[in-house]
Image (tube, rainbow, N blue to C red):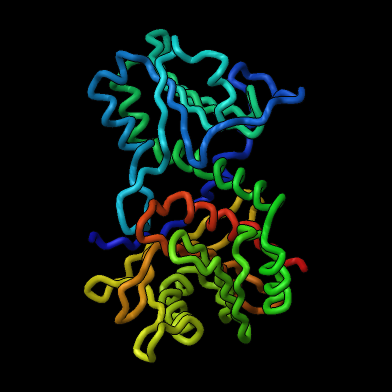
Amino acid sequence: MKRMILILTQAFCMVLMVGVFMACDGKTERRKVLPSSKGLPNELLLIVDEAVWNSSLRDSIEKVLKADVPGLSQSEPLFRMMRLYPQHFTARYTTMRNIVELRINPNLKECKMNVAYNVKAHPQIYISIFAPNPSALSSFLSVRGHDVVDLLVCSELEYEMQQLKKKYSKVVDVALREVLGCSVNVPSDIKKVKKAEQFLWASTDRLDKDLNFVAYSLPYEKDGTRFISEWVDARDSVMRINIPGSTPEKWMTTTKEAGTPLVLQQEIRLNDGRKVYEMRGLWEMHKGAIGGPFVSLAFPDSLHHRMIVVEGFVYSPDTGKRNLLRRMEASLRTLNMKE
C-alpha cells in the first residue's frame, strides 16, 4: 500500500460554497416549496454529451468522479454514478440530489462552471461545467476536479447532518455531555457506551456494519503543524488504554507500513466556519485479525485549553465501507462545544 501522508491547509467546503447559492439562470435561489430530492446515499447523476462520453474524455471524467475514497482499506468510488445523455434528462431525473452536467459549447472562449442549490428539489446541488472543446474540458477537470468533488462531498455530508439532527442517539449525546460537556448527533443505533475520564466510546456492537464513535480530549496546541505531527502517537496512546483487545497483548492502534502511519491529515474549515484538524486512515487490533477505516476531527477549545477529538471508525469486513464512514464523518461535524 502506498504511503498516505498529506498535510494541507485549505478552506475546503466553506470557501467553495460561499457565494454560489445561485440558480443556473443566474437568479437567486428559488423560494417556492420544492419537493424532496431523491437519490441513494452518495449517489450522483452525471449528464454528459454522448460524443464526450464515448471519447477518451470518459477516462478523465471517471478519474475525478469515480476516484477511490481516500483512507479506505479497499477500492471504493467516491460516488455511485448514474449517467444520462442530455436528451434523456427528463423531469423524472430533475429532483436527484446530486447532479453534474458536462457539456461542450463551441461558442465559449473558456470553461465555465456554475453551481446551483435547490433548483428543482430540496436539498439539491447542481454543478454544470461548459467547455469550448473536449481538450479544454479535460484540462479543466485536471485542475479543478478536486473542487467539484469537494462541493459534492460537502453537500452530501450536510445532507447526512440534517438527517442525523432529526434522529440521533440520545444515549450518546447525554453521555458526551457528562464526559466532555459537548453535544453530538450520531446514528441512533449507536447505543452501547463505555465512559472513562475525558474519554467516551460508543458502538452499535454488531458483528458487521459496526459503527463506532470515540471522543476524548488532548492538551491544547496552538501550533497546528505540531499538533498534526504528534496526533498519531497521541491517538495510539488513548486507544491502547481505552480500547483493549481480548488479551493483554491486543489493543487498537493506527495501521502502519514500515513504521509509517497510513493516514491522511489536513487542516480544514467546516461550513459553519470552524477550523478543525482532520485525520483519516486505517486502524487495526495489535496482534489481532480485525481492522478498518477511521476518520477523526480535532476541535481546538482554547477556552478550556484542550483539543476535543471525535472519531468515527467502522468494522465491516464483508461489505463496502464508504457510506458507513461518510455517515460517521457527518456525525462528527455536528459536535457542539457550546453546552
Up-down: is 35 above or below 16? Answer: above
Residue 203 lies, in percent from the top left, at 55, 69
Q: How many marks?
A: 0
In the image shown, does 6 or 312 lie closer to the viewer?
A: 312
Up-down: is 43 above or below 165? Answer: above
Up-down: is 68 above or below 140? Answer: below
- Please identify the quadrant where the N terminus is shown: bottom left
Q: Residue shown at 64%/34% (left/top)?
A: 123
Q: Does the rendering let one see residue 88?
A: yes
Residue 55 lies, in percent from the top left, at 24, 19
Q: Residue shown at 46%/77% (left/top)?
A: 235
State the image quarter where residue 265 is shown: bottom left
Farthest residue to the bottom: give it: 248
Up-down: is 57 above or below 327? Answer: above
Q: Does the rendering let one see residue 151?
A: no
In the image shown, does 49 or 268 lie closer to the viewer?
A: 49
In the image shown, does 204 or 53 lie closer to the viewer?
A: 204
Asked whether, in this view, residue 241 is left or right of residue 199, the answer is left
Q: Residue shown at 47%/36% (left/top)?
A: 43
